[in-house]
Image (cartoon, helix red, strand yellow):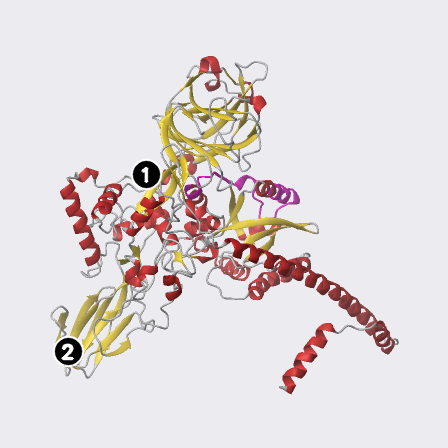
């Protein structure tokens, strides 16, 4: 105790210790005749003074941050008792539901929550000797292979049984026994007598299967067994594996027959309605839980191994099934975990970006009718997800079966709590959207973000700096990012996918760099902000590496060391700022170094906008049949975009599934955007102040900055083209006209979207804002004039009102409404 007390006192004194002026002078006098040592002493004393000043400043900053943290904690504690509520919309009047939905934040006071705490994805390790459900017989167990995927069990009666603990391999058992062995092979196995009198016994053991190979006395044997990767057409042979879903499906088929539903009308929506009426458990007949939903041979490109499908009750410990909810806590980005057997990096990257936006995950699960119906559907094992498919919000229904091992989901999950299903449900809904889990991997990060947010994305390719960029290139790149971040947009950078790199030295070097910087290959990461330190502009980047348990000091120290070794002049200043802020999972990088570690990037425009209106139309030849006439009485910032069908969906043939798999659609193959998409654009015409019957071209779409006015109309071979602007009363009414560069051989569908940042309380004729759907006649000069600056639209002769199908959401958390009429009214 005395020694510990002495050490504590010495530590405290050491922290307070400072040389007095007299002590410094005495030290200088000691070396007064040694000029070199005297200079070094002066340098050290000067550094000591600077360090003392820096420590004092950091302590002051730390005190301020702790005080702020305390205030924020108190505020959060004060508001934490109020449960989140879902907004429900009737056919015409928005109303608020007073009933919190099941997927709202799970209360810590809930008795089930306190009884059954969170289960992380690896909860079972150390508790079970097997990765999966284990052998069906008991006895003396030994591992056949070093990695433990095949086990031998010798029973008390002398039988040799084998268990396959893998989900991805068939075990080709092959044992050769000398002629003096007295064994009796299992009748289900193959026994072959060799020329030397020895006996070879073989059998193919499927995943999670246990089989007795033989019984008898063994004196000498040779093991020739080997694992073989499962074929694409493998179907799990266990009857008990699919007994539950087969039973549920039989009840559904009986209900369909009794209701007189025709075979062509059997879809997920129909089946779900019947399940709710008859109180049956829902099974998705459009995306059946079998291998056809994972990988379609001859159709899909990226192979996915056959896996068993399980409901949460099958992989959770006994009693935990009641704790399963769509959401059991905040939907934070750092809890999203990529599947160990399914490297779905594009989807995971997009989901992490969205999860950082408050409320963005909840809005994807809002029911189109009411929270009450949403609860009933989830109790039946059905989950509804809203996806913005090619610009149009569509509900996608999935069931409660997920690819899983005996203890946890095999694909994306909520890493710290596998009882929360929101990550797995979103991944399954997106897989169904494309036809299979394999097909969804072809969707890029930006396309995935567009599908989940409904907001446009633009590529940074035109301003992307070269590997050794000039100061002008860096300046252009930085200013583009700065302008976008000021508008509350998101910047996403993509790391290099190492599996596509051919030069091994470069690949190894980059892999090591990613490890030190806390990044993952082939992922998208978000830029949190820009900081100017001295003459350098630095990007604050969200680190993507998952599963690390290192401390803040370890993770931050790694990337700081990389820049220290590179002799970056700003390291000391950033060191002070970073440790003062105590930021976790954030990397600082100089803008000039971005192209060394990232191969591309894009801009995502603001998520969770207040209002959006989406109208369906089609290009007939080169003329659009639906445009917009919009009037405002005050300055209003808007984004207009036109979106054509996603090429990944355009090549997918809709096919109804059954328990034997799906009808295979044609394969897309590898094609460029120029081959896949028509060159489209969107134009904005403003009314002339003096000549009310004249509307002139004022802006067209652009990229990457859609708010920057191009010199002339641009056409883009992309899925979406967008423009951003601020509308004023002096230019009203405005006309928004989608365009296509070349005449189309047939009708080309499109969705024309309007996103409004701060909509007025009312919208309609005579109100602060009005919104009408119109059609521009073929005779209009805007279709024949090649010079957009001189193109003039004459509303009196060129424009007529038209009726079209459209979707609207005017307030945050309101549900999407779909109607067919000629104008949008909100009162």
Q: Residues within 10 Å of mark 2 (few under 14, many from 20)?
A: some
Image height of 552 relative to 425, above or below = below
Would you say 535 lies left or right of 314 here? right
Residue 735: within the magenta? no
Query: Which range of residues does the magenta coloring cover?
Result: 451-479
Q: Secondary structure at mark 1?
A: loop
Would you say 672 lies left or right of 785 here? left
Q: Observer-nearest residue: 679 or 104?
A: 104
**Distance (Cα) linking label 1 and label 2:** 55 Å
Ranked by sequence position, the earlier of labels 1 and 2 is: 2
Q: Observer-nearest residue: 99 or 355?
A: 99
Name the quadrant of the N terminus: bottom right
Q: Residue at x 76, y 66 (%)?
A: 47
Give how far across and how far down residue 670 sits, in percent: 37, 42
Give how far across and how far down residue 554 sits, in percent: 56, 66
Q: Which residue is mark 1?
A: 651
Q: Observer-nearest residue: 128 or 698?
A: 128
Q: Residues within 10 Å of mark 1 (few under 14, many from 20)?
A: some
Give how far across and how far down residue 796 sits, in percent: 47, 13
Q: Secondary structure at mark 2?
A: strand
Residue lying farthest to the bottom in this orientation: 2
Q: Residue at x 46, y 19 (%)?
A: 783
Name the quadrant of the C terminus: top left
Q: Residue 215, which numbered label?
A: 2
Would you say 760 lies left or right of 561 here? left
């Amino acid at each position: 105790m005395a020694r510990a007390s002495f050490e504590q006192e010495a530590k405290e004194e050491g922290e307070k210790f400072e040389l007095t002026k007299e002590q410094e002078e005495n030290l200088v006098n000691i070396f007064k005749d040694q000029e070199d040592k005297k200079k070094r002493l002066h340098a050290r004393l000067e550094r000591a003074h600077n360090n003392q000043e820096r420590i004092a400043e950091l302590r002051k900053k730390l005190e301020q941050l702790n005080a702020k943290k305390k205030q924020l904690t108190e505020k959060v504690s004060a508001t934490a008792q109020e449960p989140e509520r879902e907004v429900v919309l009737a056919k015409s009047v928005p109303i608020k539901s007073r009933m919190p939905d099941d997927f709202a934040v799970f209360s810590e006071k809930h008795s089930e929550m306190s009884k059954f705490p969170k289960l992380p994805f690896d909860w079972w390790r150390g508790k079970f000797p097997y990765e999966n459900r284990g052998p069906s017989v008991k006895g003396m167990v030994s591992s056949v292979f070093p990695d433990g995927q095949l086990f031998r069990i010798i029973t008390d009666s002398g039988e040799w049984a084998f268990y396959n603990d893998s989900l991805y391999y068939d075990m080709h058992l092959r044992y050769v026994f000398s002629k003096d062995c007295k064994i009796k092979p299992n009748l289900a196995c193959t026994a072959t007598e060799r020329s030397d009198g020895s006996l070879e016994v073989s059998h193919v053991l499927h995943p999670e299967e246990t089989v007795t190979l033989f019984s008898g006395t063994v004196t000498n044997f040779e093991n020739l067994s080997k694992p073989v990767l499962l074929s694409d057409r493998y179907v799990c042979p266990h009857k008990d594996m699919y007994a539950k879903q087969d039973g549920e499906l039989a009840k559904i088929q009986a209900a369909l027959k009794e209701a007189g539903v025709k075979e062509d009308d059997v879809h997920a929506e129909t089946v779900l309605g019947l399940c709710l009426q008859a109180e049956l458990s829902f099974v998705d007949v459009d995306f059946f839980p079998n291998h056809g939903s994972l990988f379609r041979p001859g159709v899909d490109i990226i192979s996915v191994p056959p896996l068993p499908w399980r409901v949460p009750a099958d992989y959770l410990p006994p009693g935990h099934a009641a704790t399963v909810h769509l959401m059991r806590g905040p939907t934070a980005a750092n809890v999203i975990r990529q599947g160990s057997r399914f490297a779905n990096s594009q989807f995971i990257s997009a989901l992490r970006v969205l999860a950082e936006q408050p409320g963005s995950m909840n809005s994807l699960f809002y029911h189109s009718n009411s929270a009450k119906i949403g609860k009933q559907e989830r109790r039946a094992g059905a989950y509804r997800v809203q996806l913005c498919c090619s610009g149009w919000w569509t509900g996608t229904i999935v069931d409660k079966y997920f690819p899983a091992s005996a203890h946890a989901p095999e694909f994306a999950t909520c890493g710290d709590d596998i009882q929360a299903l929101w990550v797995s449900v979103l991944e399954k809904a997106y897989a169904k959207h494309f036809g299979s889990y394999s097909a969804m991997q072809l969707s890029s990060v930006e396309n995935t973000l567009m599908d989940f947010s409904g907001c446009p994305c633009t590529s940074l390719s035109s301003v992307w700096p070269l590997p050794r960029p000039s100061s002008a290139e860096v300046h252009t790149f930085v200013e583009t990012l700065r302008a976008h971040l000021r508008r509350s947009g998101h910047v996403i950078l993509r790391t290099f996918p190492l599996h596509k790199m051919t030069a091994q030295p470069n690949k190894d070097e980059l892999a090591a760099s990613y490890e030190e910087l806390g990044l993952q290959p082939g992922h998208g990461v978000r830029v949190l902000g820009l900081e100017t330190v001295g003459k350098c502009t630095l990007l604050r980047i969200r680190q993507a590496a998952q599963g690390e348990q290192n401390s803040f000091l370890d993770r931050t120290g790694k990337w700081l060391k990389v820049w220290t070794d590179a002799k970056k002049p700003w390291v000391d200043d950033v060191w002070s700022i970073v440790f003062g802020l105590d930021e976790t999972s954030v990397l600082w990088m100089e803008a000039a170094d971005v192209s060394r570690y990232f191969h591309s990037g894009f801009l995502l425009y603001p998520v969770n906008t207040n209002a959006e209106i989406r109208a369906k139309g089609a290009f007939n030849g080169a003329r659009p049949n639906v445009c917009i006439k919009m009037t405002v009485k005050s300055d209003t910032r808007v984004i207009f975009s036109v979106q054509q069908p996603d090429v990944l969906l355009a090549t997918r043939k809709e096919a109804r599934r059954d328990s034997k798999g799906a009808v295979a659609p044609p394969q897309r193959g590898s094609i460029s955007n120029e081959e896949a998409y028509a060159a489209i654009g969107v134009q904005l015409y403003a009314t002339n102040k003096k000549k009310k019957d004249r509307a002139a071209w004022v802006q067209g779409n652009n990229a990457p900055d859609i708010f920057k006015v191009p010199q002339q109309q641009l056409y883009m071979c992309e899925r979406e083209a967008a423009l951003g602007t601020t509308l004023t009363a002096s230019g009203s009414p405005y006309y928004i006209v989608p365009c296509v560069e070349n005449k189309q051989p047939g009708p080309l569908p499109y969705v024309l979207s309007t996103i409004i940042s701060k909509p007025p309380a009312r919208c309609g004729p005579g109100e602060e804002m009005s919104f009408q759907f119109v059609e521009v006649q073929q005779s209009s000069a805007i279709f024949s004039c090649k010079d957009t600056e001189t193109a003039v639209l004459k509303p009196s002769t060129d424009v007529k009102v038209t009726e079209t199908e459209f979707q609207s959401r005017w307030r945050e958390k309101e549900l999407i409404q779909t109607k067919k009429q000629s104008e949008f009214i909100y009162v």
